[in-house]
Amino acid sequence: MVRFEASAGLGLKPQHFADALAARAEGLWFEVHAENYMVDGGPRLAWLAALAERRPISLHGVGLSLAGVEPLDDAHLDRLATLCDRTAPALVSEHLAWSRAGGRYFPDLLPFPRTAEALAVVSAHVDRLQNRLKRQVLIENPALYAPLAGHRWEEPEFLSRLVSATGCGLLLDLNNVIVSAANLGFSPLPYVEALPLEAVGEIHLAGHARDPNPDSRLLIDDHGAPIDEAVWVLFAQTLTRTGPRPTLIERDNNLPPFAELMAERGRAQGLLNACRTEAPLV
């Protein structure tokens, strides 16, 4: 495994493999969606292996359905474990959501009531995942779009209890915080401050879209635009509380040239560098 630092990285897309291999920026690392590489061979897996020899790699899962009531998919777990063995990732992460029920997979990361029963289910699934991979996994806070009845705990409290129960870490997606705060009507910074910030092992920065309906205030987590200024502000505020953390520029749609992503990466790296001389608040 290539040495990993609390620096800024990029989400890697096949269109940018050549640029990624040629990049010379100090501290640069890359994250991929694990499911795109959970195969037995082929050019994409070979490219990832070549990059992993030069740069730290993070695997970001989207399909385990950790909050689903059904047991985790054994075949999925095995393929993920094999990919970890092949690439020796510096970080592995998954989402606090569900996407599978009754033998059907849904192309969404779906919410759930944060109850004691849900905590038990998610904790058991995270335990199984970490035991199978023999490593800590980071769990990402979701983007939410509408109120859901039945919660026992606010999300930061639920995540705190999950960390305590399983020893997992957190992937703090600040774009998701901004999106959820706008859609549900809460303040972003108090949400961040209520989290167990010592457990944050990675931060995500991304852009979002606004509902085209002029009467709507809904924000959509589409990863299809430059990072919003509100996310940059929250990032700077968060770093004063956490100190430097590995930080990803996440872009999945409307993919720009590699140089544009590197420019955003440079801004994030600048903020990480600036906070290294300041003691965090936690």
Image (cartoon, rainbow, N blue to C red):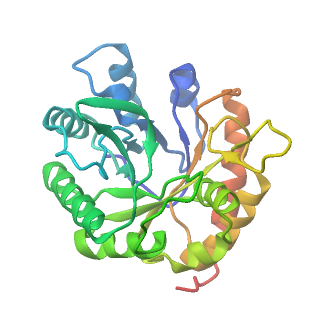
Q: Nearer the viewer, residue 19 or 189?
A: 189
260 lies left or right of 3: right
Left of 225 or right of it: where is 38?
left
Q: Residue at x 53, y 38 (%)?
A: 11
Identify the residue shown where x is 23% and y is 59%: 121
Residue, x 29% and y 62% (percent of image)? 118
Whether 257 is drawn above or below 239: the answer is: above
In the image: residue 234, left or right of residue 135:
right
Q: Residue at x 70, y 58 (%)?
A: 231
Looking at this view, is 130 or 3 the one in front? 130
Q: What is the tally of numbered marks visible in this picture?
A: 0
Point out residue 35 in the picture as x, y percentages from the top left corner: 34, 31
* In the foreground, 160 or 6: 160
Q: Give the residue at the far right of this rendering.
A: 214
- Residue 230 in picture, x, y percent from top left: 76, 59
Task: For residue 141, say whether it is visible.
Answer: yes
Q: Position of residue 100 (x, y in %)?
A: 30, 37
Q: Quadrant of residue 25?
A: top right
Vertical placement of residue 193 versus 247, above or below: below
Location of residue 26 in the rendering, given as x and y in whole percent from the top left corner: 57, 48
Q: Residue 181's quadrant in the figure?
A: bottom right
Considering only vertical position in the picture, is 126 above or below 48? below
Q: Residue furthest top?
A: 42
- Residue 276 visible in image: no
Compared across the picture, whether 83 is left or right of 225 comes to left
